[in-house]
Structures are given as structure tokens and as C-alpha cells.
Image: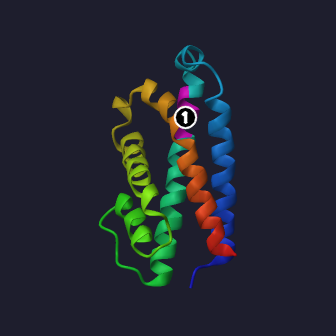
Amino acid sequence: MVDLPKLDQMLTALAAYVVELRRLGSVSREAFLADADKIGSSKYHFIVAIETCIGIAHHVIASEGYRFPRDNADAFSVLVEHGRLPEASEASLRAMARFRNRLVHVYWDVDDERVYEYLQDALGDLDDFHDHARGWIS
């Protein structure tokens, strides 16, 4: 059974991370790329936000006895298979898991412009995941 207080706590943290990512992405591309602190903070907040989504996915999968995912990206596919997430969100969430892997494991070779692009284009995916997962509580 899903631990609803734990899920609520994780979703609250996710929402706070997304707020911070929005703040970091609110500057121009030039201002962002010229500010090492904004770049580093963005990378960190992406890691913890995406890791939170992955943690939520794994918690639900384990709690409900769904098949074991092959990797973190596959965890989102498992949730799609069981109707927990819409099929339309699968590709973007899988891409986010891969982006997190790059930030964590190939951190020396992450294009800062790509980080800015994610700030502009990918936060809605985190919002959508949050909203779907929040619905699992009610």
C-alpha cells in the first residue's frame, strides 16, 4: 500500500524544487549563462526534482507490486502501463530521467545551454507529474 504521508511529503518537496527552477529560469539566456551560481543551482535542483519523481515512481511500483523497472526511465513506463500516468507523458519523463543521469554521472560534460533550455521547456512535465501523483492521494 502506498504510504500517503510519505507521498505527500515528496510531492511538497517536488513543488518547492519546481518553484526554485522557475525562479532560476526567469532570467535571460545571457544572464543565466554568465552566472555560475545560477547554473550550478539549476543543475542541483533538477537532480533533486527528477530524483523525487523517480523516488515517487519506485515507491508506487513497489507498494502496488508492479513489475520491477529495468532502470529509472522505465519506472515511468511501468506507471503508464498501469494507468497511473498518461501515455503522452512517458517520453518526456523518460528523457528527464536520462537528463538526471547525465547531470549525476557525466557532470563534467553537461551543456549549460541545454540546462537553460530545460528550464524553459521541461518544467511543465514536472508539474504534470506532480499533478497526476497528487491525484493518487485523493
- Image location (x, y in percent) of residue 116: 51, 28
Can you identify the residue that label 1 sits on? 119
Quadrant containing the C terminus is bottom right
User: Which colour style is shown?
Assistant: rainbow
Q: Which residues are magenta?
A: 39-44
Nearest the viewer among 4 and 37 is 4
Q: Residue at x 55, y 34 (%)?
A: 119
Q: Is residue 48 visible?
A: no
Vertical order, 58 against 111 (above or below): below
- Image location (x, y in percent) of residue 42: 56, 34
Q: Quick one: which residue is furthest to the left in this view? A: 70
Q: Secondary structure at mark 1?
A: helix
From the image, give the main secondary structure of the stretch colored magenta.
helix
- Image location (x, y in percent) of residue 135: 65, 69
Q: Is residue 119 left or right of residue 106?
A: right
Residue 84 included in the magenta stretch of the image: no
